[in-house]
Amino acid sequence: MSCCGQRRAILRAPTPVREAPVPAVAPEPARAAPVAAGERRVAVEYLARAPVAVRGAATGHLYRFGAAEPRQHVEERDAAALLRTRFFRRAD
């Protein structure tokens, strides 16, 4: 049987820190969601500067906004939810 002091020493020992690997390639640029037949789009503008990814409440499409690409055409049903926030406005 081991002594309690030995167990405490093990718990106090520093744990090595691992750094996550840096990806070798840059992430893909944001792309607009594909347009389905009969789908109506609305131009919206993102008012903040920090990049954000938003999933459309009605369609589930993923929209990516940021300082580099603040204006995009969004499906009309998704635009309604975005425009109710203080982060988006109509860009028409």
Image (spheres, helix red, strand yellow):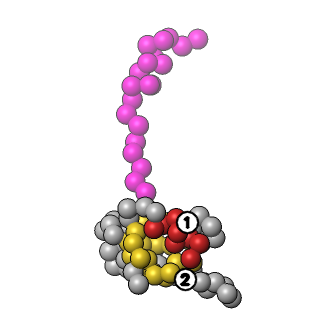
Find residue 6 and report its horizontal and vertical position in percent: 46, 17
Find residue 3 and report its horizontal and vertical position in percent: 50, 11
Dividing the picture into quadrants, the one containing residue 41 is: bottom right
Q: Is residue 63 left or right of residue 45?
A: right
- What span is in magenta? 1-23
Dividing the picture into quadrants, the one containing residue 50 is: bottom left
User: Which is nearer the N-term, disc 2 or disc 1?
Assistant: 2
Q: Which mark is residue 41?
A: 2
For the stretch drawn in magenta, what is the main secondary structure? Answer: loop
Q: Estimate how packed mark 2 is, as few (under 14), some (14 to 19) or many (20 or more) residues with alpha carbons within 10 Å.
A: some
Task: Note whether 46 is above or below 20 in the view shown.
Answer: below
Q: Amino acid at mark 2?
A: Arg
Q: Residue at x 52, y 72 (%)?
A: 79
Q: Is residue 59 left or right of residue 12?
A: right
Task: Note whether 34 is above or below 79 in the view shown.
Answer: below
Check disc 1 and report the residue beneath it. 55
Q: Estimate how packed mark 1 is, as few (under 14), some (14 to 19) or many (20 or more) residues with alpha carbons within 10 Å.
A: few
Check residue 9 for magenta coloring: yes
Dividing the picture into quadrants, the one containing residue 16 is: top left
Task: Note whether 43 is above or below 60 in the view shown.
Answer: below
Q: At numbered mark 1, what does the secondary structure look like: helix, strand or loop?
A: strand
Q: At numbered mark 2, what does the secondary structure look like: helix, strand or loop?
A: strand
Q: Residue at x 39, y 72 (%)?
A: 89
Q: Residue at x 44, y 25 (%)?
A: 11
Q: Residue at x 56, y 70 (%)?
A: 78
Q: Quadrant of the N terminus?
A: top right
Check residue 55 for magenta coloring: no
Q: What's the CA distance linking mark 2 and mark 1?
A: 15 Å
